[in-house]
Amino acid sequence: MAGMPLSVAHAIVHPAQSTLPHRLNTATELYYILSGTGRMHVGTDSVAVHPGQIVLIPQRETQYLENCGTTDLSFLCIVSPAWSVDDEELVC
């Protein structure tokens, strides 16, 4: 999507796994849950997620997604402005 003001990625989290805690310093993210169930952690909040749900992740908020189910958790990650490796920061 070169030249677009956003990026879209498809990701999968396997059962009993999670994404790494991270934040984007200048971009806002939307996660659209396609299949599976899990728990989305944004800042100090967490919420159960299921297919059809959209989660907003504001810039500079630490976030990660864990798969609490028994099947793959599949989602679209929409980032605006477009994702850049220089914008992402892992949080330990």
Image (cartoon, rainbow, N blue to C red):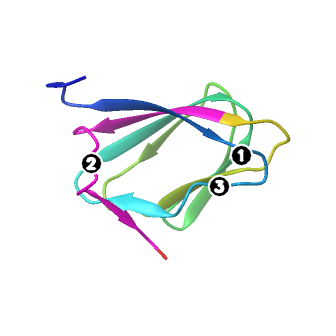
- Residue 19 in view (yes/no): yes
- Residue 30 is one of the magenta-drawn residues: no
Q: Residue at x 38, y 29 (%)?
A: 8
**For the residue labelled by badge 1, is the local secondary structure a helix, a strand or a loop?**
strand
In the depicted structure, whether residue 47 falls above or below residue 75: below
The magenta segment is 74-91
Along the viewing direction, whichever of 53 and 67 lies nearer the viewer: 67
Q: Which residue is mark 3?
A: 18
Q: Which residue is mark 2?
A: 27
Looking at the image, is mark 3 or mark 2 earlier in the sequence?
3
The reply, left or right, for residue 32 in relation to residue 1 is right
| Numbered mark located on residue 38 in the image | 1
- Residue 79 is one of the magenta-drawn residues: yes
Q: Nearer the viewer, mark 1 or mark 3?
A: 3
Badge 1 local density, few (<14 within 10 Å), some, or many (20+)?
many
Q: CA distance from mark 1 to mark 2?
A: 23 Å
Q: CA distance from mark 1 to mark 3?
A: 9 Å
